[in-house]
Image (tube, helix red, strand yellow):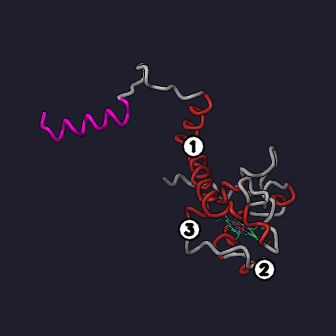
Amino acid sequence: MKPLLSMVVVACCLATGCARPGSDKFKEPSPIEALAVRDILLDPAAKSRSRGRNVFKHYCSICHGDEGKGDGFNSTNLTVPPRDFSSPEFWRRTADEHLLRTVSRGGLAVGKSVLMPAWGHTLNDRQMRDTVAFLHTLAAEGEPTADDSCRPTGLP
Ligand code: HEC
């Protein structure tokens, strides 16, 4: 084996611990982890929601709160509080297209507070759809959530 190649093999082994199913170092995923991974691999909508969760955590939760209840770290500085995305009332009267428009163009463009920024220059279309798809998961358990027009159509 050439020296460079063998160094790469050793480095890979160190990084992964050379773990294989059946070996001592391989940690079987818990049933819940395995189900989550399976859902994400098989279900493009789950994949979309999962990407949306990351966007939400990064850009939105500071105002909207980790669970979307409008209680993020920054919410005390906002004269108009962000909506509670877990509220049944909110989902009864809100369609995805409205949410997308608000996220893309900001509060002012849809007659709401300017304190809700416009994200259309920061996020691409898919990221905004993913985020809206994720918002649905914040609805209180068992609540129907408006329409499903944000379901992805098999995007990678
Ligand atoms: C600087 C704080 C802040 C950040 C960051 C922020 N928002 Fe908002 N958002 C608000 C406020 C305040 C409102 C309420 C506006 C109103 O009701 O007049 C709002 C409203 C909304 C609404 C409309 C709800 C309705 O009543 O129709 C959506 C959807 C929304 N935000 C999504 C997001 C998403 C997605 C992100 C991240 C990409 C985000 N927001 C980031 C402050 C923020």
* In the image, the residue with mark 3 has its CB under 8 Å from the nearest atom of ligand 1: yes
Look at the picture and state if 16 lies above or below 81. above
Whole-percent x, y for residue 24 in the image? 43, 20
- Amino acid carrying label 2: it is Gly
Q: Residue at x 58, y 33 (%)?
A: 33
Mark 2 touches mark 1? (CB < 8 Å): no
Secondary-structure class at tag 1: loop
Q: Residue 111, labelled with which disc?
A: 2
Q: Is residue 71 magenta?
A: no
Q: Residue at x 55, y 62 (%)?
A: 126
Q: Element at badge 3?
A: loop
- Residues 147 and 113: in front is 113
Q: Residue at position x 73%, y 62% from top?
A: 73
Label 1: how many Cα within 10 Å (few below 14, some 14–19, many 20+): few
Q: Are marks 3 and 2 in contact (CB under 8 Å)?
A: no
Dot label at residue 59: none
146 up-or-down from 99: above or below: above
* Residue farthest toward the left in the current orientation of the protein: 2
Q: Give the residues drawn in magenta, as a range.
A: 1-17
Name the quadrant where ligand 1 sits. bottom right
Give the residue type that dot 3 points to.
Leu
Disc ID at residue 43: 1
List the residue tagged with mark 3: 123
Distance (Cα) linking label 3 and label 2: 21 Å
Residue 150 in the image: state x and y as whole percent. Answer: 65, 58
